[in-house]
Image (spheres, rainbow, N blue to C red):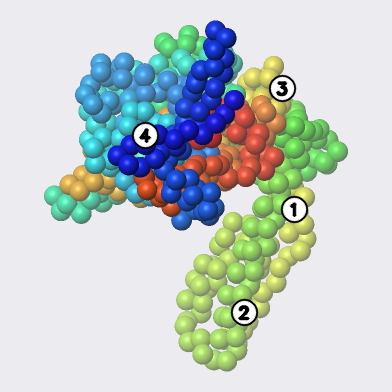
Amino acid sequence: MASVIGKKVNGRTYYYLAESARVDGRPRIVSQRYLGSADDIAAAVAGAAGAPEHSRHLAFGDVAAVWSTLERLSVARIADEVAGGRGGQLPIGACLAVAVLHRLTGATMEIADWWPTTAAARFVRPKPPAGGWTAPRLWRRLDKLSVPEMERIEAELAAVVRKIAGGGAALAVDVPGFATFVASAEAMAIGTRATTLVGLGLVVTGDGAIPLVSRAYRRDVPVVASFGAMAEQLSARHRRLAGRDVTLVFDTGQHSQLNLSTGPHFVGALPPADFPELLSRPATARRAVDARRFPGVTALDTRAAVFGVNRRVILTHSTNLHAAQARGLAQALSTATRQLDGLAAGLAAGTYRQSRDELLTELARITRVPRVDRVLTTRISADMRLEWRIDEAARARLDQEIFGKQLLVTDHDDWPVADVVTAYRARYHLDSTFRQLNEPFVTGPPAARWYWTDHRIAVFSLTNVIAATVAHVMRREADRAGLDLSVRELLEQLSGIQETLLRYPSTGGRPRTRRVLTDRDGRQQQLFDLFGLSAYAPKA
């Protein structure tokens, strides 16, 4: 039974909600809840339960999902164990985990500005140091990691990933455009390079392209290790860790750096134009690859002479790629013809006064665009008039024989076509992910008096590789739940789940606050459940 009782203290009466029950046959008060003074109760009835004074929206869905995955992968624990507990009140593991969290969910902002806009303070442990998270503090801590320690962190994390992804194929891939680092003004003043170009070699899982081991390398030095040599080093590291060989994945033109006769297994791309007889095969010769994994993708699985050896080749066609390439050509033609019309008008009006050779140079610049030069022709008459036309027959040939097609070669004669396509696309998934991670981030100095040494580039690379690991684990899990999303789409969907903080007027004590999550659509609810976000949601 509930009742309200009053207690007088210093002449004022304070009220409690009392719950009574029989204990051993006698009525007893078993619980009390403080309600406040009569004024407090009146204010609560009159208005405290009404509209809040103000509200704030905090990032929740993407932050909680990334943090949940970081915890499941034990990133902070692994880093702390490897670093031997260094870091005191600010462990290196926490710094690494927060750096990855920031990279995936808030890289458009400085860390100090990003942290207060998130709900992370409720569930990220340990709490930020005095003064909060700042880029100088974070990077100074991470700068203490040695190269052997970074490799051990990567190796321990790879063991966790293999348990999640299973023991399937591993792929060696190259991301030559990983990052460009801009030196600080102070560093340039003492002679440091203005920019440093860095590529990244990786071994990743065949299922999900999840990074296992990596190696950053400088592209702006006189001698750059070939893809083949770098792949062999990465493969050797992976064999020591997992006891398994890898499959090399190479892009068009990289075959010259590899020994395809005696080296490891491979999946690579060939220039389709070098095999016109395959390009001319009718669409009816192709079969659907996998309607769920690769909707709109068909393939011709055959054999051909490649580099003097009869090998398995797979000609694929993607309706999405076809449409994108057709749109790209239409846009490029529109730009080129608009410029040609301007030139033609200038010549006709006599306002274009350059020489014939200069005009030819200008025409070459306008039309020297991939595929545009195959369908657009120009002619200059004797009286310096310009004519141009689009060869529709040539355009039709592009549409029928080139657009949407890729030609793959492999020595995996036993792999299903879908597995070959998956392996080849691994590099593009990684390239897209790293482009997204670096896109909003000016890879310049994160703090005053900072400049990019090889060691600091290695620390940054480790952070980005772990961020890609987290993102690709999440994407793989979403894919297995029937959600075909890119990393960008996945994080965008999650970022739509926000936390709203409502602050109500004070009734004599501290202002009351309430936290609620924003509404979720069907897909967001699936992701909410998939990543266990209820464990991080504010309590009612």
User: Which quadrant of the figure contains the C terminus?
Assistant: top right
The type of residue carrying mark 1 is Asp
The residue furthest right is 284
Q: Label 3's element?
A: loop
What residue did someone put label 4 on?
A: 98
Residue 478's label in the rendered image is none
What residue did someone put label 1 on?
A: 399
Residue 416's label in the rendered image is 3
Q: Label 2's element?
A: helix
Viewer-side label of 4, 2: 4
The type of residue carrying mark 3 is Pro
The type of residue carrying mark 2 is Asp
- Does residue 236 lie above or below 391 as drawn? above
Q: Earlier in the sequence, mark 1 or mark 2?
A: 2
**Dot 4, how many residues are within 10 Å of its Cα: few (below 14), some (14-19), or many (20+)?**
many
Whether residue 247 appears in this view of the structure is no
